[in-house]
Image (spheres, rainbow, N blue to C red):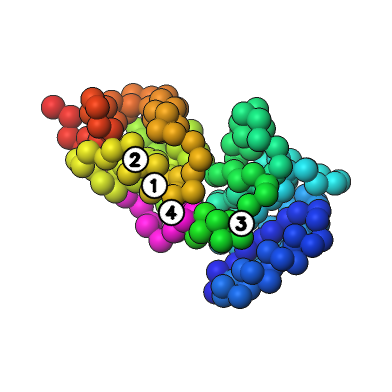
Amino acid sequence: MLKLLFADDESALRETVKDYFEAKGFSVCTAKNGNEAVLAAEKEEFDIIILDVMMPRKDGLAACREIREIRRCPVLMLSALSAEKDYLGGYGSGADDYIAKPFPLSVLYEKCMAMIRRSGGAGKITRGGITLDADRRSVYADGRELPVRGMDFDLLAYLMNNAGIVLSREIILTRIWGYDFDGDERAVDSHIKSLRKALGNHADRIKTVIGTGYRFEEDIK
């Protein structure tokens, strides 16, 4: 049974989400503020954690930073805020994705399932001198851990699992961001740039295919 931690200060929303996800077969733990969310994460492991940004006592961003010190599961930030700086704040705190209120419960559920599928069960894979550990959501090369986080990690995992295959921006958007993503293909280019920076000396593993998309190159001649 999949386990969800849902933290939001709106009691009606907590109950609605809890009922919906339990009907889908989840075990759901709820919290009404950031402190409760951190305590719950310290006590047990979850398959996914959803944190509202604006909560009393401790906001979602602060809670996410603390949870990231002890847990590697996907974290989805939830907020009525939609400015770019608010999204960046969510990613900067260690969150994997972001969804703005209001939202259909079906969209929230599908986004969570996509994040869970991307994060689990792949173990370790090594391609072109880069090792990706899906269970710990960590990336290593040249004997050290590389700063690949959040959506950049999911993007690298998808590229490495399809090494040698040209992946269009549209396909990448669908597989990584999901069908409900409201942005455009520039999001892929932005994350590719960020990912290459994090890969450092191994940045050239990710090749640009003009007019199409990107390819992870395992053997560079």
Residue 215 locus on image (x, y percent): 25, 35
Estimate the spatial distance between the alpha carbons at disc 1 and disc 4, rounded to whole Å: 12 Å
Q: Residue at x 59, y 50 (%)?
A: 75
Residue of label 3: 104
Residue of label 1: 174
Please state which amino acid type lies under the numbered disc 2: Glu
Residue 21 occupies quadrant: bottom right
Residue of label 4: 118
Asked whether the residues under the numbered discs 2 and 1 touch, taking CB atoms below 8 Å apart as contact, a structural biologist would say yes
Q: Nearer the viewer, residue 150 or 103?
A: 103
Residue 38 locus on image (x, y percent): 74, 53
**Is residue 105 something that shows in the picture?**
yes
Q: In the rendered structure, which segment of residues is drawn in magenta? A: 114-128
Is residue 125 covered in magenta?
yes
SS under mark 3: loop
Please state which amino acid type lies under the numbered disc 4: Arg
Asked whether the residues under the numbered discs 4 and 3 touch, taking CB atoms below 8 Å apart as contact, a structural biologist would say no
Residue 171 locus on image (x, y percent): 32, 44
First in sequence, mark 4 or 3: give its number: 3
Is residue 178 covered in magenta?
no
Asked whether the residues under the numbered discs 3 and 2 touch, taking CB atoms below 8 Å apart as contact, a structural biologist would say no
